[in-house]
Image (spheres, helix red, strand yellow):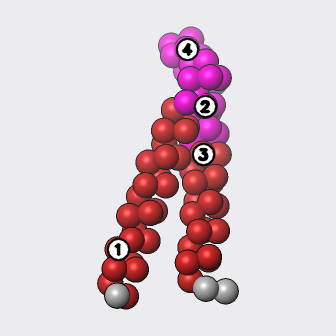
């Protein structure tokens, strides 16, 4: 399998994992701080999307650096 295809598959997995992990963490924080912080599920999904987008940008920057080094 070519490197670019493998990197694209891992990109999708990385962004999905970042989204799932951030949703889980924000839900746990929401349950623990139930009486202090009030998160809506929509807000949790938006924040998780932003976090996953940042993880995706970070991963893409690493891929670009890797392929530029290779020449």
Q: Which residues are magenta?
A: 22-46
Helix, strand or loop at disc 2?
helix
Instruction: State which quarter of the image contains the C terminus.
Output: bottom left
Q: Can you identify the residue that label 3 sits on?
A: 19
- The quadrant in which residue 61 appears is bottom left
Q: Residue at x 44, y 48 (%)?
A: 54
Are circles 2 and 3 on residues that touch, CB within 8 Å?
Answer: no
Please indicate, yes or no, whether residue 54 appears anywhere in the rendered image. yes
Q: Residue 38: x percent and y percent?
A: 55, 14
Please indicate, yes or no, whether residue 29 appears anywhere in the rendered image. no
Q: Is residue 13 above or below residue 36?
A: below
Instruction: State which quarter of the image contains the N terminus.
Output: bottom right
Q: Is residue 34 magenta?
A: yes
First in sequence: mark 3 or mark 4? 3
Q: Any mark on residue 65, and which?
A: 1
Q: Residue 33: x percent and y percent?
A: 55, 21
Real-space Cα separation, disc 2 to disc 4, in angstroms: 14 Å
Of helix, strand and loop, which mostly describes the magenta segment? Answer: helix
Q: Can you identify the residue that label 2 sits on?
A: 45
Q: Which of the two discs, 2 and 1, sits closer to the camera?
A: 1
First in sequence: mark 2 or mark 1? 2
Real-space Cα separation, disc 3 to disc 1, in angstroms: 24 Å
First in sequence: mark 3 or mark 1? 3
Are circles 4 and 1 on residues that touch, CB within 8 Å?
Answer: no
């Amino acid at each position: 399998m070519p490197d670019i295809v493998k990197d694209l598959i891992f990109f999708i997995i990385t962004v999905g994992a970042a989204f799932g992990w951030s949703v889980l963490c924000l839900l746990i924080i929401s349950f623990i701080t139930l009486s202090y912080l009030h998160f809506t599920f929509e807000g949790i999904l938006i924040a998780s999307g932003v976090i996953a987008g940042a993880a995706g940008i970070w991963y893409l920057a690493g891929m670009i650096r890797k392929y530029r080094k290779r020449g």
